[in-house]
Amino acid sequence: MIKRDYKGPIENSIEMAIEKIVNLLQYDYYLSPRSIAILLLQEDEGIRNLVKEKDAAGFSEIEQIVNNLKTYYKNPISYELAIERQNEVNDILKKAVRFAKDSISFRERLSRLLMNPVLGIPVFLLVSYFGLYKFVGQFGAGTVVDFIETNIFDKYITPFAENMVARFIPWQFLHELFIGEYGLITMAFRYAFAIILPITAFFFLFFSLIEDSGYLPRIAMLIDRTFKKIGLSGRAVIPMVLGFGCATMATMVTRILPTKRERIIATLLLALAVPCSAQLGVIMALLQHNPMALFIWAGVIGFIFLLVGYLTSKILPGDRPSFYMEIPPLRMPSLSNVIVKTYVRVKWYFKEIMPIFLWAGVLIWLGRLAKIFDFLVDILKGPLRAIGLPAEAAKAFLFGFFRRDYGAAGLYDLSAHGKLDGVQLVVSCVALTLFLPCIAQFLMNIKERGWKIGIGISVFVLFFSFSVAYVLNIVLKTLGVIL
Amino acid sequence: MSVKKIAIVGNPNVGKSVLFNALTKQYVVVSNYPGTTVEVSRGKMNLDGAEYEVIDTPGMYSLYSITEEERVTRDILIKERPEIIIHVVDAKNLERMLLLTLQLIEADLEVILVLNIMDEAVKEGVSIDVGLLEKELRIPVVPAISTAGKGIDNLKKKISEYDKKRL
Amino acid sequence: MDKKIILPLSKLDLHKKAKVSHIKTEDKAMLQRIIAIGALPNIEITLIQRFPSFVFQIGKSQFAVDKELASCIYVKAV
C-alpha cells in the first residue's frame, strides 16, 4: 500500500522493522499487519497487550525489534511517523486543494472578541444569567415544574396511585413504600418526572445550544488559567456549568475529564461548593430581600470552592492537568440537531438516574420504618445548635437531603415565623449549600468514584460544611454583623 | 445473514453525530462501551433492502490511542470488524485530518471519506478537487454538509456501490 | 531580533507567521497531543492570543492550549 522511504541505516530503518514484524504476526487483527506493526513500533499499550495475547510465540522477538529500532532514533517513533505522514498528506493536498488568500471574516472577529477576557468574561456572565438562571432556573425549574406538579401529579397521578395502593395492598407498612410523603410513586417517580425531567430537559437544551454554536471551548479557554489553580483544566468547565443545573448529572459527566485525579477533584467540588438549580432556587428565595446576606453567601461559597480546590490539588498525587482544546468556528446551531441531541441526552440520563431514585426511595422507606430518621434528626440538632441555628432546623436539613421542597419549606417556615435572624439565615444557607445537595448525588458519587472515594467525599463534605458554618457564625457574631 | 456494520470515525467536532443522525434517523441506542465510561451510539439503516448497523464512534485523532475514547474506537474496529468505515473530516482542515485517513487506508479498511462542513470550507476559500483526491487516495470521497442534509444521498450510493463491489 | 531564531511558540509575537521547527518534550502523552493537533515540523502556525490561554492557528483550525503545551512547540519566524 503506502510505502515510504525512511532515513537511517537501512537494516535498522522503520520500513525494515515493519517488514520484520509483519512476518511475525499470525493472528488476523482485522487491521492490516502493517498497521499493527506500526502501532507496535509506536509502543501503543493496547495493541501491545493484544499482540502479546494473540501472537504469544513471536512476541519477544517483536519486542526486541521495537527496542532495537528505538536506539537508532533520537525522537519517538510516533513523531517520526507523524512527520512522514504529514509530508505525504501535504503532497496530496498540493495537487488536489487550493487555498484562497486569508482574510479575517466577521465571524472570526466575533470569535476573537469572545476569547478576549475583557469582553469575553462579561459575555459569559450574561449567557449564564439568561441561559442558566432565567431559562433553566426560573422558567424550567420554576414555571414548568410547578405546572407539572400541580396540574398533573397532584390532580391525577397521586390520587390514582393512592387509590390503587389502598385497593390492592392490604399491609399498611407496605403502603408507605409506594405512597405518602416518601413513597416510590409519590416521591421517587414524582421527583424524577415532575422535577428532574423538566429541569434536565431545559438544561440539556441550553447546553446543546452553547455546545453546537461552538461557544463552549471559548469558555474553557477563558477559565483554564483559573481552573489550573484548583487542579482542573478548562475542560472541566463542562461538568461545572452542568453542576448548576443538576450536580448529580454533572458528577456523571466528569467522565469527560482525562485523568482520575481531575475526576476526583471535580466530584468533590460538585458535592461541596456547586449549588444545583434546586438549591439555588431555595437560597435565592430565602435571601432575595437581603442583598448583603446574598453577597456574603456568594463570597463564602466562592472562596470555599477555590480554597478546597487549591488544597486538594496540592494534596492529591498525580500530574498537573494539561489543557488543549480545538476552538471550532462559531456556528448557527441547527434546531433539529439540538432537539435530537437534547432528546438522546435526556433519555440516556434518565436511564442512569432512575434506578438511583428508586434505590433512594427504598432506603428512605427502610430508614423511616426503622425509626432511623428520628434518630438522625436528634443527631443533627447538636451540630446545628453549635452553628447557632435553632434545633427545629434539623428536620429541614435532613428532609432537604431527601426532598428539596421539604427542606426549603422547613427553612421558609422558620424564617417566616421570625425564628431566624439575618446571621442565622446566611449561616444556614452556607451550610445547606455546602452540604450534599441530595441523596441522588450521594449515590452517584459512590457509583462513579467507587465506595471508598464516594463515601470519603460525602463524609468530608458533611463535616466540612458544618465546620465552615460554625466558623462563619463566630466570625459574623464577633464582628457584630447585623443583617 | 448477519447485519453489516458501518463505523463512523473521525476527529471530535467534525459533525459525526449529525451524519449519524442523518443516516439512521431512528432506532438509536446509546450505551457505555463495556468496561468503560465512553458512550457509543448505534442505529439501524436500511439501504436497497439491506440492513446495516451504524456505529457512531467516539472522537479519535489517530489509530495510536492515548485517550479512552480512542481506545474504544480502535477496539470497535478490531473486535466488531465493520465492513465499511466512514471517515468524516472537516473539509477546510484536510491538512490535519488526512493523517488518520492514511492510517485507515494503511490498515486495509474499506474507507469512504466524507468531506463534511463543505459550506465553511467554501466560505474560507478552500477549493477541493474531489475527483483528484479520490484518485490520489484510491477511495470514494463524498463532499457533504450534514447539517443541511447535503451529500447524504451520495454517501448512501457509495455505500451500496461498495457492497456490490464486494459481492 | 534575529529573524531566523528558533523560539518556543509561547514567546512568538502575536499574528506573526511562523513555521514549526520541532517539538521538544519528554512526555509521551504531550507529544501525542501535539501530533493530534498537527503542529508538526514545517507546518505554518500563527499565535493569535496569549492570555488567558494560548490560542494559535494551524491551517484553518484554532486551538487553545496552556503554557506548558505552547512551550513544547518550537517555531521559526518566516
Image (cartoon, rainbow, N blue to C red):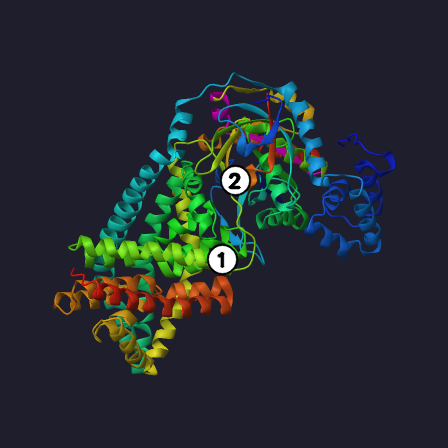
Q: Is residue A371 left or right of residue A61?
A: left
Q: Position of residue A344 (x, y in %)?
A: 43, 48
Q: Position of residue A230 (x, y in %)?
A: 44, 53
| Marks 2/1 same chain | no
Chain letter of mark 2 equals C
Looking at the image, which residue sits at the far right? A11
Q: Secondary structure at mark 1?
A: helix
The quarter of the picture where residue B157 lies is top right
Q: Which residue in the structure is indicated by mark 2?
A: C67
Amino acid type for the residue under numbered disc 2: Lys
Q: Position of residue A354 (x, y in %)?
A: 40, 62
**Magenta-tinted stretch:** B108-123
Image quadrant for the N terminus of chain A?
Answer: top right
Q: Position of residue A392 (x, y in %)?
A: 21, 74
The quarter of the picture where residue A163 lies is bottom left
Task: Say which of A166 and C10 sits in front.
Answer: C10
Give the answer, above or below, for where A56 lies relative to A38: below
Across the whole image, how many numbered discs are drawn on residues?
2
Q: Is residue A240 left or right of residue A34?
A: left
Q: Which residue in the structure is indicated by mark 1?
A: A314
Task: Say which of A113 and B41 sits in front.
Answer: A113
Residue for point 29% across, 59% down: A279
Q: Residues within 10 Å of mark 2 (few under 14, many from 20)?
A: some
Residue B118: in magenta span: yes
- Residue B138 appears in the rendering: no
